[in-house]
Amino acid sequence: MQREIDVLRNRLRALAVPPGPAAPPAVRQPSRTAAAPTPEPAEHPGALPDQRVALLLDFPGLLAFARKRGRSVSAEEILRGVVRGRRLVRAVAYGAPGTGEELASLLEHAGFEILAGEGSRSAAAADLRTLSARVDSVVAAGFDDSLEGPLREARESGARTEVAGFEPNDAPGLAGVAHAFLRLGEEGPPRPRG
């Protein structure tokens, strides 16, 4: 019974429209002394200030898409663009360089947990299934269509699902399953799946 109540609550939060601008909530601070950037308040449908969000980032996949598109990648900008004033619960960078390396330090400074090594897609799929029951919204960034099944399960469990990337056709199956596509590097609301 409690599970059904949680699913309905998540669905209502995903569909609600905020009444107006609100002060941005605190973002989980990285373990370093420098503070992570404060995201802008959410001012569009589907992104409420009290909405709990988790970001799952395929770091090598995002770098590959960035090279393909001739774009640069900033961990802080990705986090700010995805969170958009919501309450960040967890941000995980899968397949990132090991702790102590410069890229890993930049990711940690921005507020990401680092999960280095192989098997990042299976770890992300397992985390997606687990987190979808604990947060209101899950965002997959940089993944290819191999995460389509777990993202569909997350959506069916009642969580709002979003895909972040440079172009929806980088992972069309994944973008097609999600509630919305977040274009990295652009300000504004996510584009609903149409």
Image (spheres, rainbow, N blue to C red):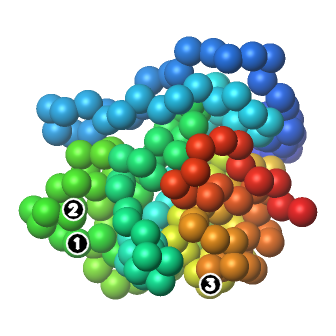
Q: Residue at x 53, y 29 (%)?
A: 40
Using residue 178 as the reference point, say whether residue 23 is left or right of it. left
Q: Residue furthest right?
A: 194
The span from disc 1 to disc 3 (Cα, nearest Å) is 21 Å
Q: What is the secondary structure assignment of the residue under circle 3?
A: helix
Of 39 and 98, nearer the camera is: 39
Q: Which residue is mark 3?
A: 146
Q: Which residue is mark 2?
A: 104
Crowding near the residue tagged with mark 2, few <14, some 14–19, many ≥20 C-alpha atoms within 10 Å? many
Q: Is residue 101 visible?
A: yes
Q: Are marks 1 and 2 in contact (CB under 8 Å)?
A: yes
Q: Which residue is mark 1?
A: 97
Residue 25 x, y percent position in the rendering: 51, 22
Q: Residue at x 52, y 46 (%)?
A: 81
Q: Is residue 81 above or below residue 127?
A: above
Q: Is residue 128 above or below residue 15?
A: below
Q: Is residue 5 visible?
A: no
Crowding near the residue tagged with mark 3, few <14, some 14–19, many ≥20 C-alpha atoms within 10 Å? some
Residue 11 x, y percent position in the rendering: 84, 42
